[in-house]
Image (cartoon, rainbow, N blue to C red):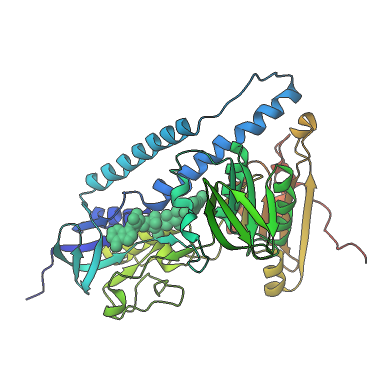
Amino acid sequence: MPQTYDYDLFVIGAGSGGVRASRIAANHGAKVAVAEEYRVGGTCVIRGCVPKKLFVYASQFSEEFEDAAGFGWTVGETSFSWEKLIANKDREIDRLNGIYIRNLDRAGVTIIQSRAVLKDAHTVHLVAEGRDVTADKILIATGATPFKPESVPGIEHAITSNEAFHLERLPEHVIVVGGGYIAVEFAGIFNGLGAQTVLLYRRDRILRGFDEDLRIGLMEEMPKKGVDLRTNADIASIERKGGRLHATLKDGSVIETDAIMYATGRMPHSRGLGLEELGVEIKKNDAIEVDAYSRTSVPNIYAVGDVTDRAALTPIAIREGQAFAETVFNDNPIAVDHTLIPTAVFSQPELGTVGLTEHDAREKFGEIDIYKTSFRPMKHTMTGRHEHTFMKLVVDAKTDRVLGVHLMGPSSGEIIQAVGIAVSMGATKKQFDATVAVHPTAAEELVTLKEKWAPPAS
Ligand code: FAD
Protein backbone atom coordinates (compact mmCIF):
# COMPACT_ATOMS: atom_id res chain seq x y z
CA MET A 1 0.00 0.00 0.00
CA PRO A 2 1.42 3.45 -0.87
CA GLN A 3 2.42 5.46 2.18
CA THR A 4 0.02 8.28 3.06
CA TYR A 5 1.05 11.65 4.43
CA ASP A 6 -0.80 14.57 6.00
CA TYR A 7 0.21 16.79 3.08
CA ASP A 8 1.47 16.41 -0.48
CA LEU A 9 3.73 19.42 0.10
CA PHE A 10 4.99 21.09 3.26
CA VAL A 11 6.71 24.44 2.75
CA ILE A 12 8.96 25.93 5.43
CA GLY A 13 8.96 29.73 5.08
CA ALA A 14 6.17 31.96 3.71
CA GLY A 15 8.36 34.47 1.88
CA SER A 16 8.57 35.25 -1.83
CA GLY A 17 9.59 31.74 -2.90
CA GLY A 18 7.53 29.74 -0.39
CA VAL A 19 4.28 31.60 -0.99
CA ARG A 20 4.51 31.28 -4.78
CA ALA A 21 5.38 27.57 -4.62
CA SER A 22 2.54 26.89 -2.15
CA ARG A 23 -0.08 28.64 -4.24
CA ILE A 24 0.93 27.10 -7.57
CA ALA A 25 1.19 23.60 -6.08
CA ALA A 26 -2.25 24.00 -4.47
CA ASN A 27 -3.68 25.27 -7.76
CA HIS A 28 -2.44 22.05 -9.36
CA GLY A 29 -4.43 20.07 -6.81
CA ALA A 30 -1.81 19.36 -4.14
CA LYS A 31 -2.67 19.41 -0.44
CA VAL A 32 -0.29 22.07 0.87
CA ALA A 33 0.71 23.56 4.24
CA VAL A 34 3.19 26.35 4.84
CA ALA A 35 4.86 27.21 8.17
CA GLU A 36 6.00 30.75 8.95
CA GLU A 37 7.78 31.71 12.15
CA TYR A 38 7.52 35.49 11.72
CA ARG A 39 5.15 37.12 9.25
CA VAL A 40 3.64 35.86 5.99
CA GLY A 41 5.19 37.74 3.08
CA GLY A 42 8.78 37.17 4.16
CA THR A 43 11.74 39.48 3.92
CA CYS A 44 10.76 41.38 0.78
CA VAL A 45 7.33 42.43 2.00
CA ILE A 46 7.95 42.74 5.74
CA ARG A 47 11.54 43.99 6.06
CA GLY A 48 13.16 44.20 2.66
CA CYS A 49 12.30 45.54 -0.80
CA VAL A 50 8.92 47.08 0.00
CA PRO A 51 9.57 49.07 3.22
CA LYS A 52 13.03 49.93 1.86
CA LYS A 53 11.54 51.49 -1.29
CA LEU A 54 9.00 53.40 0.83
CA PHE A 55 11.92 54.77 2.85
CA VAL A 56 13.72 55.73 -0.36
CA TYR A 57 10.68 57.72 -1.48
CA ALA A 58 10.55 59.42 1.92
CA SER A 59 14.20 60.34 1.77
CA GLN A 60 13.99 61.93 -1.70
CA PHE A 61 11.70 64.79 -0.63
CA SER A 62 14.53 66.78 0.98
CA GLU A 63 16.18 67.18 -2.43
CA GLU A 64 12.89 67.85 -4.14
CA PHE A 65 12.20 70.73 -1.75
CA GLU A 66 15.63 72.20 -2.52
CA ASP A 67 15.32 71.67 -6.26
CA ALA A 68 11.90 73.30 -6.40
CA ALA A 69 13.51 76.74 -5.99
CA GLY A 70 15.10 76.50 -9.45
CA PHE A 71 11.60 76.19 -10.92
CA GLY A 72 10.26 79.22 -9.14
CA TRP A 73 8.82 77.61 -6.03
CA THR A 74 9.30 78.93 -2.55
CA VAL A 75 8.94 76.03 -0.18
CA GLY A 76 8.08 77.06 3.35
CA GLU A 77 9.58 75.56 6.45
CA THR A 78 9.60 71.77 6.21
CA SER A 79 9.79 69.18 8.95
CA PHE A 80 9.93 65.42 9.00
CA SER A 81 8.25 62.98 11.36
CA TRP A 82 9.96 59.60 11.61
CA GLU A 83 7.08 58.33 13.77
CA LYS A 84 4.57 59.15 11.04
CA LEU A 85 6.70 57.49 8.36
CA ILE A 86 7.02 54.32 10.45
CA ALA A 87 3.29 54.25 11.28
CA ASN A 88 2.28 54.70 7.63
CA LYS A 89 4.86 52.17 6.46
CA ASP A 90 3.61 49.65 9.04
CA ARG A 91 0.04 50.16 7.89
CA GLU A 92 1.02 49.42 4.30
CA ILE A 93 3.02 46.34 5.33
CA ASP A 94 0.01 45.08 7.35
CA ARG A 95 -2.16 45.53 4.27
CA LEU A 96 0.25 43.54 2.08
CA ASN A 97 0.62 40.87 4.77
CA GLY A 98 -3.19 40.53 4.75
CA ILE A 99 -3.24 40.14 0.95
CA TYR A 100 -0.60 37.39 1.11
CA ILE A 101 -2.58 35.54 3.78
CA ARG A 102 -5.83 35.87 1.81
CA ASN A 103 -4.19 34.62 -1.39
CA LEU A 104 -2.87 31.53 0.38
CA ASP A 105 -6.29 30.91 1.99
CA ARG A 106 -8.01 31.31 -1.35
CA ALA A 107 -5.69 28.73 -2.91
CA GLY A 108 -6.57 26.32 -0.10
CA VAL A 109 -3.11 26.38 1.52
CA THR A 110 -3.02 25.75 5.30
CA ILE A 111 -0.95 28.44 7.05
CA ILE A 112 0.75 27.36 10.26
CA GLN A 113 2.20 30.14 12.43
CA SER A 114 5.23 28.33 13.81
CA ARG A 115 8.88 27.63 13.40
CA ALA A 116 9.24 24.32 11.57
CA VAL A 117 12.17 21.90 11.64
CA LEU A 118 12.70 18.52 10.02
CA LYS A 119 12.64 15.32 12.06
CA ASP A 120 13.14 13.04 9.09
CA ALA A 121 12.76 13.33 5.33
CA HIS A 122 8.95 13.25 5.60
CA THR A 123 8.28 14.57 9.12
CA VAL A 124 8.14 18.22 10.13
CA HIS A 125 8.12 19.29 13.76
CA LEU A 126 6.06 22.43 14.47
CA VAL A 127 7.89 24.04 17.37
CA ALA A 128 5.14 26.47 18.49
CA GLU A 129 2.50 23.76 18.46
CA GLY A 130 4.66 20.91 19.77
CA ARG A 131 3.38 18.46 17.16
CA ASP A 132 4.57 16.67 14.05
CA VAL A 133 3.07 16.55 10.56
CA THR A 134 4.10 14.47 7.58
CA ALA A 135 4.44 15.34 3.90
CA ASP A 136 5.42 13.62 0.70
CA LYS A 137 7.50 16.57 -0.56
CA ILE A 138 9.19 19.24 1.52
CA LEU A 139 10.26 22.67 0.28
CA ILE A 140 12.80 24.71 2.22
CA ALA A 141 12.18 28.43 1.54
CA THR A 142 13.66 29.91 4.69
CA GLY A 143 15.51 32.81 3.05
CA ALA A 144 18.58 34.43 4.57
CA THR A 145 19.41 36.40 7.70
CA PRO A 146 21.55 39.52 8.12
CA PHE A 147 25.09 38.94 9.27
CA LYS A 148 27.00 40.88 11.95
CA PRO A 149 30.68 40.10 12.59
CA GLU A 150 30.51 38.72 16.14
CA SER A 151 34.28 39.17 16.51
CA VAL A 152 33.92 42.98 16.75
CA PRO A 153 33.85 43.96 20.45
CA GLY A 154 30.61 45.82 21.21
CA ILE A 155 28.85 44.45 18.11
CA GLU A 156 25.72 43.94 20.25
CA HIS A 157 25.20 47.73 20.04
CA ALA A 158 24.93 47.58 16.25
CA ILE A 159 21.76 46.91 14.29
CA THR A 160 20.99 45.35 10.91
CA SER A 161 18.39 46.25 8.29
CA ASN A 162 15.85 44.23 10.31
CA GLU A 163 15.96 46.74 13.18
CA ALA A 164 16.41 49.78 10.93
CA PHE A 165 12.76 49.46 9.94
CA HIS A 166 11.64 49.84 13.56
CA LEU A 167 14.00 52.39 15.12
CA GLU A 168 12.22 54.47 17.75
CA ARG A 169 13.65 57.67 16.34
CA LEU A 170 15.70 58.76 13.35
CA PRO A 171 19.34 58.91 14.50
CA GLU A 172 21.02 62.29 14.12
CA HIS A 173 24.26 60.54 13.25
CA VAL A 174 24.52 57.08 11.75
CA ILE A 175 27.23 54.79 10.44
CA VAL A 176 26.34 52.22 7.79
CA VAL A 177 28.92 49.45 7.39
CA GLY A 178 29.13 47.56 4.10
CA GLY A 179 29.51 48.07 0.38
CA GLY A 180 26.68 46.01 -1.07
CA TYR A 181 23.38 47.28 -2.39
CA ILE A 182 21.60 47.27 0.98
CA ALA A 183 24.39 49.36 2.53
CA VAL A 184 24.38 52.00 -0.20
CA GLU A 185 20.59 52.13 -0.24
CA PHE A 186 20.36 52.71 3.51
CA ALA A 187 23.16 55.29 3.43
CA GLY A 188 21.06 57.22 0.89
CA ILE A 189 17.91 56.80 2.97
CA PHE A 190 19.43 58.05 6.24
CA ASN A 191 21.23 60.88 4.45
CA GLY A 192 18.11 62.03 2.61
CA LEU A 193 16.07 61.98 5.82
CA GLY A 194 18.58 64.32 7.41
CA ALA A 195 20.92 62.08 9.41
CA GLN A 196 24.66 62.79 9.22
CA THR A 197 25.61 59.57 7.47
CA VAL A 198 28.96 57.81 7.26
CA LEU A 199 29.28 54.82 4.93
CA LEU A 200 32.24 52.61 5.80
CA TYR A 201 33.48 49.94 3.44
CA ARG A 202 36.55 47.82 4.04
CA ARG A 203 37.60 47.50 0.39
CA ASP A 204 38.45 50.25 -2.06
CA ARG A 205 35.32 50.21 -4.21
CA ILE A 206 31.65 49.65 -3.30
CA LEU A 207 29.20 47.33 -5.12
CA ARG A 208 31.46 44.41 -5.96
CA GLY A 209 30.19 42.55 -9.04
CA PHE A 210 28.69 45.63 -10.70
CA ASP A 211 30.23 47.33 -13.74
CA GLU A 212 33.28 49.38 -12.74
CA ASP A 213 31.87 52.59 -14.23
CA LEU A 214 28.77 52.31 -12.04
CA ARG A 215 30.89 51.60 -8.96
CA ILE A 216 33.10 54.61 -9.62
CA GLY A 217 30.17 56.79 -10.67
CA LEU A 218 28.17 56.13 -7.51
CA MET A 219 31.24 56.73 -5.36
CA GLU A 220 31.53 60.17 -6.98
CA GLU A 221 27.84 61.03 -6.65
CA MET A 222 27.03 59.89 -3.10
CA PRO A 223 29.37 62.34 -1.35
CA LYS A 224 27.91 65.21 -3.43
CA LYS A 225 24.60 64.47 -1.73
CA GLY A 226 26.18 64.50 1.71
CA VAL A 227 27.15 60.89 2.46
CA ASP A 228 30.56 60.69 4.11
CA LEU A 229 31.84 57.70 2.12
CA ARG A 230 35.00 56.13 3.49
CA THR A 231 36.56 53.16 1.74
CA ASN A 232 39.37 50.95 3.06
CA ALA A 233 37.79 51.63 6.44
CA ASP A 234 36.29 49.29 9.00
CA ILE A 235 35.21 49.26 12.63
CA ALA A 236 37.56 47.60 15.14
CA SER A 237 35.32 48.02 18.21
CA ILE A 238 32.19 49.73 19.46
CA GLU A 239 31.55 51.19 22.90
CA ARG A 240 28.42 52.72 24.39
CA LYS A 241 29.26 55.92 26.27
CA GLY A 242 26.34 57.73 27.75
CA GLY A 243 23.62 57.74 25.14
CA ARG A 244 26.05 57.56 22.25
CA LEU A 245 28.12 54.98 20.42
CA HIS A 246 31.86 55.35 19.90
CA ALA A 247 33.14 53.42 16.89
CA THR A 248 36.89 52.95 16.88
CA LEU A 249 38.07 52.30 13.35
CA LYS A 250 40.96 50.02 12.43
CA ASP A 251 43.13 53.09 11.74
CA GLY A 252 42.58 54.19 15.36
CA SER A 253 40.24 57.08 14.60
CA VAL A 254 36.97 57.32 16.54
CA ILE A 255 33.54 58.30 15.22
CA GLU A 256 30.82 59.26 17.68
CA THR A 257 27.40 58.32 16.45
CA ASP A 258 23.85 57.42 17.48
CA ALA A 259 23.39 54.22 15.49
CA ILE A 260 25.55 51.73 13.62
CA MET A 261 23.93 49.56 10.98
CA TYR A 262 25.76 46.56 9.56
CA ALA A 263 24.87 45.56 6.01
CA THR A 264 27.82 43.26 5.47
CA GLY A 265 26.00 40.30 4.02
CA ARG A 266 23.18 37.84 4.50
CA MET A 267 23.66 34.18 5.42
CA PRO A 268 21.37 31.54 3.89
CA HIS A 269 19.06 30.35 6.67
CA SER A 270 19.81 26.62 6.56
CA ARG A 271 21.26 25.87 10.00
CA GLY A 272 19.21 24.35 12.80
CA LEU A 273 16.53 22.97 10.50
CA GLY A 274 17.67 19.36 10.82
CA LEU A 275 19.01 19.30 7.26
CA GLU A 276 22.58 18.24 8.03
CA GLU A 277 21.29 15.26 10.06
CA LEU A 278 19.29 14.12 7.01
CA GLY A 279 22.30 14.37 4.72
CA VAL A 280 21.12 17.42 2.74
CA GLU A 281 24.26 18.90 1.19
CA ILE A 282 25.03 22.40 2.42
CA LYS A 283 27.81 24.59 1.01
CA LYS A 284 30.46 26.39 3.07
CA ASN A 285 28.46 29.62 3.02
CA ASP A 286 25.39 27.77 4.41
CA ALA A 287 23.60 27.72 1.02
CA ILE A 288 21.64 24.55 0.31
CA GLU A 289 23.01 22.70 -2.72
CA VAL A 290 20.31 22.12 -5.36
CA ASP A 291 20.10 20.97 -8.97
CA ALA A 292 18.55 22.96 -11.83
CA TYR A 293 15.08 21.91 -10.61
CA SER A 294 15.75 23.00 -7.01
CA ARG A 295 16.06 19.42 -5.73
CA THR A 296 18.49 18.86 -2.85
CA SER A 297 20.65 15.77 -2.34
CA VAL A 298 17.65 14.15 -0.54
CA PRO A 299 15.21 13.36 -3.37
CA ASN A 300 11.91 14.51 -1.76
CA ILE A 301 13.37 17.70 -0.29
CA TYR A 302 13.63 20.84 -2.42
CA ALA A 303 14.88 24.37 -1.73
CA VAL A 304 14.26 27.74 -3.42
CA GLY A 305 15.13 31.39 -2.90
CA ASP A 306 17.83 33.03 -0.81
CA VAL A 307 18.54 29.84 1.12
CA THR A 308 20.08 28.45 -2.08
CA ASP A 309 22.06 31.64 -2.79
CA ARG A 310 21.70 31.47 -6.55
CA ALA A 311 20.65 35.12 -6.94
CA ALA A 312 19.25 36.68 -3.76
CA LEU A 313 16.44 38.70 -5.31
CA THR A 314 12.69 38.49 -4.92
CA PRO A 315 11.78 37.89 -8.58
CA ILE A 316 14.27 35.01 -8.65
CA ALA A 317 12.84 33.41 -5.48
CA ILE A 318 9.37 33.73 -7.02
CA ARG A 319 10.50 32.15 -10.29
CA GLU A 320 12.25 29.32 -8.50
CA GLY A 321 9.12 28.69 -6.40
CA GLN A 322 6.93 28.67 -9.49
CA ALA A 323 9.32 26.43 -11.46
CA PHE A 324 9.50 23.97 -8.55
CA ALA A 325 5.69 23.70 -8.31
CA GLU A 326 5.30 23.34 -12.09
CA THR A 327 8.01 20.68 -12.23
CA VAL A 328 6.85 18.59 -9.28
CA PHE A 329 3.07 19.09 -9.28
CA ASN A 330 2.23 19.73 -12.93
CA ASP A 331 4.67 17.42 -14.69
CA ASN A 332 6.06 20.47 -16.48
CA PRO A 333 9.81 20.59 -15.78
CA ILE A 334 11.14 24.16 -15.69
CA ALA A 335 14.72 25.15 -14.85
CA VAL A 336 15.13 28.83 -14.00
CA ASP A 337 17.70 30.65 -16.12
CA HIS A 338 19.93 32.69 -13.81
CA THR A 339 22.10 34.18 -16.53
CA LEU A 340 20.36 37.45 -17.47
CA ILE A 341 18.89 39.20 -14.48
CA PRO A 342 17.91 42.87 -14.76
CA THR A 343 18.29 44.52 -11.39
CA ALA A 344 18.18 47.93 -9.72
CA VAL A 345 19.98 49.48 -6.80
CA PHE A 346 17.81 52.09 -5.12
CA SER A 347 20.81 54.18 -4.23
CA GLN A 348 20.73 57.91 -4.76
CA PRO A 349 21.28 58.27 -7.69
CA GLU A 350 19.65 55.00 -8.70
CA LEU A 351 21.37 52.24 -10.67
CA GLY A 352 19.98 49.80 -13.22
CA THR A 353 21.91 46.97 -14.77
CA VAL A 354 21.38 43.96 -17.01
CA GLY A 355 23.75 41.51 -18.64
CA LEU A 356 27.52 41.39 -18.58
CA THR A 357 29.82 44.00 -17.08
CA GLU A 358 32.54 45.33 -19.38
CA HIS A 359 35.09 43.23 -17.52
CA ASP A 360 33.11 39.96 -17.77
CA ALA A 361 32.18 40.60 -21.42
CA ARG A 362 35.84 41.13 -22.32
CA GLU A 363 36.80 37.88 -20.56
CA LYS A 364 34.03 35.92 -22.24
CA PHE A 365 33.88 37.46 -25.72
CA GLY A 366 37.31 39.00 -26.21
CA GLU A 367 36.54 41.78 -28.63
CA ILE A 368 33.82 44.10 -27.41
CA ASP A 369 32.68 47.64 -28.18
CA ILE A 370 31.79 50.09 -25.45
CA TYR A 371 29.39 52.99 -25.87
CA LYS A 372 29.00 55.34 -22.96
CA THR A 373 27.83 58.79 -22.05
CA SER A 374 27.69 60.95 -18.98
CA PHE A 375 25.54 64.07 -18.84
CA ARG A 376 23.69 66.39 -16.53
CA PRO A 377 20.00 65.43 -16.35
CA MET A 378 17.76 68.09 -17.94
CA LYS A 379 16.06 68.79 -14.63
CA HIS A 380 19.33 69.85 -13.06
CA THR A 381 20.02 72.50 -15.71
CA MET A 382 17.44 74.45 -13.66
CA THR A 383 18.30 73.30 -10.15
CA GLY A 384 22.04 73.88 -10.34
CA ARG A 385 22.65 70.44 -8.86
CA HIS A 386 25.90 68.90 -10.10
CA GLU A 387 24.61 65.41 -10.56
CA HIS A 388 25.47 63.15 -13.47
CA THR A 389 23.53 60.52 -15.30
CA PHE A 390 25.61 57.74 -16.81
CA MET A 391 24.73 55.17 -19.48
CA LYS A 392 26.78 52.40 -20.97
CA LEU A 393 26.25 49.68 -23.58
CA VAL A 394 28.54 46.67 -23.80
CA VAL A 395 28.38 45.19 -27.31
CA ASP A 396 29.86 42.03 -28.82
CA ALA A 397 32.07 43.35 -31.66
CA LYS A 398 31.58 40.18 -33.75
CA THR A 399 27.79 39.81 -33.63
CA ASP A 400 26.78 43.38 -32.68
CA ARG A 401 24.67 41.87 -29.87
CA VAL A 402 24.15 44.06 -26.80
CA LEU A 403 25.63 42.04 -23.93
CA GLY A 404 25.10 44.49 -21.09
CA VAL A 405 23.46 47.80 -20.21
CA HIS A 406 24.51 49.78 -17.12
CA LEU A 407 22.74 52.92 -15.97
CA MET A 408 23.06 55.48 -13.19
CA GLY A 409 20.51 58.24 -12.79
CA PRO A 410 16.86 58.92 -12.02
CA SER A 411 14.47 56.04 -12.86
CA SER A 412 17.29 53.68 -13.84
CA GLY A 413 15.34 50.80 -12.27
CA GLU A 414 12.31 51.56 -14.43
CA ILE A 415 14.40 51.98 -17.59
CA ILE A 416 16.42 48.79 -17.10
CA GLN A 417 13.26 46.69 -16.76
CA ALA A 418 12.22 47.67 -20.30
CA VAL A 419 15.73 47.49 -21.78
CA GLY A 420 16.07 44.07 -20.15
CA ILE A 421 13.44 42.73 -22.57
CA ALA A 422 15.51 43.80 -25.57
CA VAL A 423 18.74 42.45 -24.10
CA SER A 424 17.21 39.09 -23.19
CA MET A 425 15.79 38.84 -26.74
CA GLY A 426 19.34 39.22 -28.06
CA ALA A 427 18.90 42.68 -29.57
CA THR A 428 21.82 44.13 -31.52
CA LYS A 429 23.24 47.63 -31.31
CA LYS A 430 21.80 48.23 -34.80
CA GLN A 431 18.34 47.37 -33.47
CA PHE A 432 18.82 49.75 -30.56
CA ASP A 433 19.80 52.45 -33.10
CA ALA A 434 16.80 51.66 -35.29
CA THR A 435 14.45 52.37 -32.38
CA VAL A 436 12.95 55.85 -32.47
CA ALA A 437 14.01 58.03 -29.53
CA VAL A 438 11.51 59.33 -26.98
CA HIS A 439 12.29 63.01 -26.60
CA PRO A 440 13.13 64.64 -24.24
CA THR A 441 14.10 61.78 -21.94
CA ALA A 442 17.32 60.46 -20.48
CA ALA A 443 16.62 56.99 -21.87
CA GLU A 444 16.77 58.26 -25.47
CA GLU A 445 20.55 58.24 -25.09
CA LEU A 446 20.37 54.44 -25.25
CA VAL A 447 19.21 54.58 -28.87
CA THR A 448 21.37 57.52 -29.97
CA LEU A 449 24.85 56.44 -28.80
CA LYS A 450 26.97 56.75 -31.94
CA GLU A 451 30.63 56.90 -30.94
CA LYS A 452 32.48 53.84 -29.74
CA TRP A 453 34.32 54.67 -26.58
CA ALA A 454 38.11 54.49 -26.77
CA PRO A 455 40.38 54.64 -23.74
CA PRO A 456 42.17 57.99 -23.53
CA ALA A 457 45.63 57.84 -25.15
CA SER A 458 48.26 57.64 -22.44
P1 FAD B 1 12.29 35.25 2.49
O1 FAD B 1 11.43 36.22 1.78
O2 FAD B 1 13.34 35.76 3.39
O3 FAD B 1 11.30 34.31 3.31
C1 FAD B 1 11.76 33.33 4.20
C2 FAD B 1 10.74 33.18 5.30
O4 FAD B 1 11.01 31.99 6.03
C3 FAD B 1 10.79 34.31 6.32
O5 FAD B 1 9.51 34.89 6.43
C4 FAD B 1 11.20 33.64 7.62
O6 FAD B 1 10.60 34.20 8.76
C5 FAD B 1 10.73 32.21 7.39
N1 FAD B 1 11.44 31.17 8.14
C6 FAD B 1 12.78 30.99 8.22
N2 FAD B 1 13.06 29.88 8.91
C7 FAD B 1 11.86 29.33 9.28
C8 FAD B 1 11.50 28.16 10.00
N3 FAD B 1 12.39 27.31 10.47
N4 FAD B 1 10.19 27.93 10.19
C9 FAD B 1 9.23 28.79 9.72
N5 FAD B 1 9.53 29.89 9.03
C10 FAD B 1 10.84 30.15 8.80
N6 FAD B 1 15.19 41.91 -3.53
C11 FAD B 1 14.79 42.53 -4.68
O7 FAD B 1 14.52 41.83 -5.67
N7 FAD B 1 14.69 43.88 -4.76
C12 FAD B 1 14.96 44.69 -3.71
O8 FAD B 1 14.85 45.92 -3.82
C13 FAD B 1 15.36 44.09 -2.49
N8 FAD B 1 15.60 44.85 -1.41
C14 FAD B 1 15.96 44.26 -0.23
C15 FAD B 1 16.19 45.07 0.86
C16 FAD B 1 16.56 44.51 2.07
C17 FAD B 1 16.80 45.39 3.25
C18 FAD B 1 16.66 43.09 2.18
C19 FAD B 1 17.04 42.47 3.49
C20 FAD B 1 16.43 42.27 1.10
C21 FAD B 1 16.06 42.85 -0.14
N9 FAD B 1 15.83 42.07 -1.26
C22 FAD B 1 15.46 42.67 -2.45
C23 FAD B 1 16.01 40.60 -1.25
C24 FAD B 1 14.68 39.87 -1.11
O9 FAD B 1 14.01 40.34 0.05
C25 FAD B 1 14.94 38.38 -1.00
O10 FAD B 1 15.70 37.97 -2.11
C26 FAD B 1 13.63 37.57 -0.99
O11 FAD B 1 12.81 37.96 0.08
C27 FAD B 1 13.95 36.07 -0.89
O12 FAD B 1 12.79 35.34 -0.77
P2 FAD B 1 12.81 33.92 -0.04
O13 FAD B 1 11.46 33.32 -0.27
O14 FAD B 1 13.99 33.15 -0.44
O15 FAD B 1 13.02 34.26 1.51
User: Which quarter of the figure has residue 329?
Assistant: bottom left
Q: Residue at x 46, y 73 (%)?
A: 285
Quarter in which the N terminus is drawn: bottom left
The vertical placement of 215 against 365, above or below, is above
Q: Residue at x 62, y 38 (%)?
A: 192
Q: Is residue 168 above or below residue 456?
A: above
- Which residue is found at the position 27% from the left and 73% from the top? 274
Q: Residue 272 falls in which quadrant of the image?
A: bottom left
Ligand 1: give its quadrant: bottom left
- Whether residue 81 appears in this view of the structure is yes
For the image, the number of numbered tags is 0
Work out which residue is located at the far right of the displayed protein and give it: 458
Front position in the image: 329 or 142: 142
Who is closer to the viewer here, 378 or 248?
Answer: 248
The answer to whether 381 appears left or right of 255 in the picture is right
Judged left or right of residue 233, residue 383 is: right
